Image (spheres, rainbow, N blue to C red):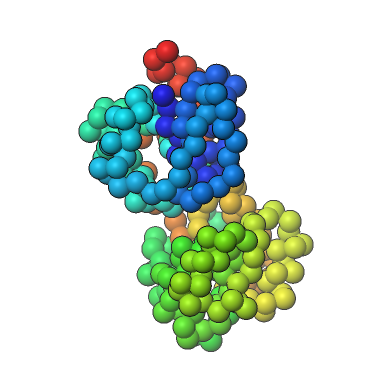
């Protein structure tokens, strides 16, 4: 049995691939999402610590892991690496190819949220495209300066925002987009001075975000993608993933 950590574009590609290969797998996400199951596909949700993951792997005869989770899910990556290496289970990391760095006075790259906060000037309107989980981490900023967060229009996301006491009127509900004009209009409508985002590659439309910033003379701060554990075997496309699975799987 294969265990897939998904909830991303890469996760959907992995699920489609394994179904086409007729390989039984479990699709796992942190929060409950709509996911269609069948005779070879099962679904689970909920965070797992190291002990819980080890118990799940042993209890479900997991022989391989495909980690297609979000690149910034650092705790999950660490948990998977420790448990999988301990049990000697191969992990294929379906990652996102990073874009070349953009050299421009409006574009800033940082390694942490703390570095990003240090760069932010007072009395500047911030648009955070870093996800609902980052609301708490950016509390020192939005408590004192006008800040908008674009988050997914999902009950669980709205609940997290409420728990952080973030102002509802400063939430922008929607998905990332590669519609240049739509994104430019967003910057102008909310009179944004600075955009904060993550280095997600084109799966997260990073190139569009950078282009929008440059066209609107808006600063953009990009939090660099964290390093992936060395134990993972990294792939960037479904064809390579299929080849590796075919060579590794025990039928």
Report how many numbered discs are placed on residues in the image.
Answer: 0
Task: Check the picture and name the quadrant holding the N terminus.
Answer: top left
For residue 237, above or below residue 189: above
* Residue beneath the point at 72% across and 66% down: 184
Q: Position of residue 13 (x, y in %)?
A: 58, 34
Q: Residue at coordinates 47% horizontally, 17% vertically from top-left? A: 246
Residue 104 visible? The answer is no
- Residue ranking furthest to the right: 181
Q: Position of residue 39 (x, y in %)?
A: 55, 23
Query: Is 150 on the left or on the right of 92, as rendered?
Result: right
> Which residue shows up at 55% across the image and 47% down it?
33
In the image, 62 versus 186, the foreground residue is 62
Decide: is 7 above or below 222. above
- Residues 47 and 213: in front is 47
Task: Residue 160 in the image: state x and y as whole percent.
Answer: 48, 66
Asked if residue 57 lies left or right of residue 162, the reply is left
| Relative to 58, 182 lies left or right | right
Residue furthest left as drawn:
86
Q: Measured along the vertical axis of the image, is residue 203 above or below residue 168?
A: above
Q: Taking the image as drawn, is residue 188 in sight?
A: yes
* Quadrant of the frame with the C terminus: top left
Q: Nearer the viewer, residue 76 or 243?
A: 76
Residue drawn at x 50%, y 58% is 198
In this rendered view, identify the residue nearer to me: 222 or 189.
Answer: 189
């Amino acid at each position: 049995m294969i265990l897939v950590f998904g909830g991303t574009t890469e996760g959907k590609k992995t699920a489609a691939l394994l179904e086409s290969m007729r390989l039984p797998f479990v699709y796992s996400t942190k929060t409950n999402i709509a996911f269609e199951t069948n005779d070879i596909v099962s679904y689970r949700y909920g965070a797992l610590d190291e002990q819980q993951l080890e118990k799940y792997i042993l209890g479900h005869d997991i022989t391989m892991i495909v980690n297609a989770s979000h690149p910034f899910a650092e705790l999950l990556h660490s948990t998977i690496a420790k448990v999988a290496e301990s049990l000697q289970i191969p992990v294929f990391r379906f990652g996102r190819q990073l874009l070349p760095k953009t050299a421009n006075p409006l574009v800033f790259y940082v390694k942490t949220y703390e570095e990003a906060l240090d760069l932010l000037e007072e009395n500047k309107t911030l648009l955070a495209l870093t996800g609902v989980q980052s609301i708490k981490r950016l509390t020192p900023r939005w408590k004192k300066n006008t800040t908008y967060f674009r988050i997914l229009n999902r009950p669980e996301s709205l609940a997290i925002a409420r728990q952080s006491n973030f102002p509802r009127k400063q939430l922008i509900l929607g998905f990332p987009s590669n519609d240049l004009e739509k994104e430019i209009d967003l910057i102008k409508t909310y009179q944004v001075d600075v955009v904060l985002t993550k280095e997600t590659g084109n799966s997260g439309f990073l190139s569009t975000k950078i282009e929008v910033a440059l066209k609107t003379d808006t600063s953009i701060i990009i939090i660099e993608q964290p390093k992936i554990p060395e134990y993972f075997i990294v792939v960037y496309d479904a064809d390579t993933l299929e080849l590796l699975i075919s060579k590794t799987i025990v039928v």
